[in-house]
Image (cartoon, helix red, strand yellow):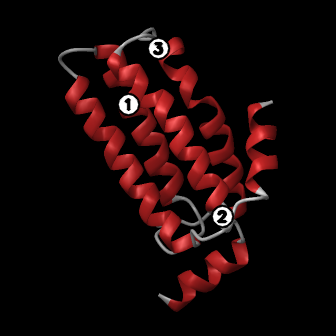
Amino acid sequence: MLVDAINSSSSKVPKFISPTAHGVIDYCHAAFFFTVGMLCSRSNKRAAIAAVATGGFILVQSMLTDYRFGIKPVIPFATHGKMDRVFAASSWMIPMIFGFKGTKAARIFETNSLAESSVVAATDWSSERAREEARAA
């Protein structure tokens, strides 16, 4: 249901984030969650585990995506976009799943859903454009 809402609103947003720019955002996003994990490690172990797991997922997904910054490009960029839609629609649930709902750390994940949805909506998900940018690099 949330993925459908993201998909329908996404078609109305200008696509100003290129695959290359999206790759930069992805690696920054992973680093952000690793940092959140470190910062929460003493005060909220569950949030720290969730943040490191999230950062790890984003990092591996990025490394495996067929775009300029992919290391072993096995995931088409368009498929990466579908995965991002699901993550954007569900990351607000991570605090509930990991048992830290209602904490300051939970707000990070809840806000991430909105930020991720914005990036998903503004990204040009053309796998062909991603391959062209990777070849030109």
**71 versus 113 height, above or below:** below
What is the number of callouts on the image? Answer: 3
Residue shown at the point (56%, 87%) measured from the top left: 135
Tag 3 secondary structure: helix
Q: Residue 25, percent across and down?
A: 44, 59
Dot 1 crowding, Cα within 10 Å, few <14, some 14–19, many 20+ = many
Image location (x, y in percent) of residue 55: 40, 40
State whether residue 27 is above or below residue 37: below
Left or right, residue 83 beside residue 70: right
Badge 2 marks a residue whose secondary structure is helix
Residue extending farthest to the left is 42
Which residue shows up at 68% across the image and 67% down it?
A: 14
Number of the label disc, if any, that sits on residue 77: 2
Counting from the top left corner in percent of width and height, residue 4 is at 81, 39
Q: Which quadrant of the figure has residue 75?
A: bottom right
Along the polypeptide, which appears first: circle 3 or circle 2? 2
User: Distance of mark 3 from mark 1, alpha carbons?
Assistant: 10 Å
Amino acid type shown at disc 1? Ala
Q: State the image quarter where residue 91 is shown.
A: top right
Drawn side of residue 55 relative to residue 82, left or right:
left
- Say if mark 3 contacts mark 2, CB within 8 Å: no
Query: Which quarter of the picture shows residue 129?
Result: bottom right
Label 1: which residue? Answer: 51
The residue tagged 3 is 98
For badge 2, the amino acid type reads: Phe
Q: Are discs 2 and 1 less than 8 Å apart at CB? A: no
Label 1: state its secondary structure.
helix
Q: Earlier in the sequence, mark 2 or mark 1?
A: 1
Amino acid at the residue labelled 3: Phe
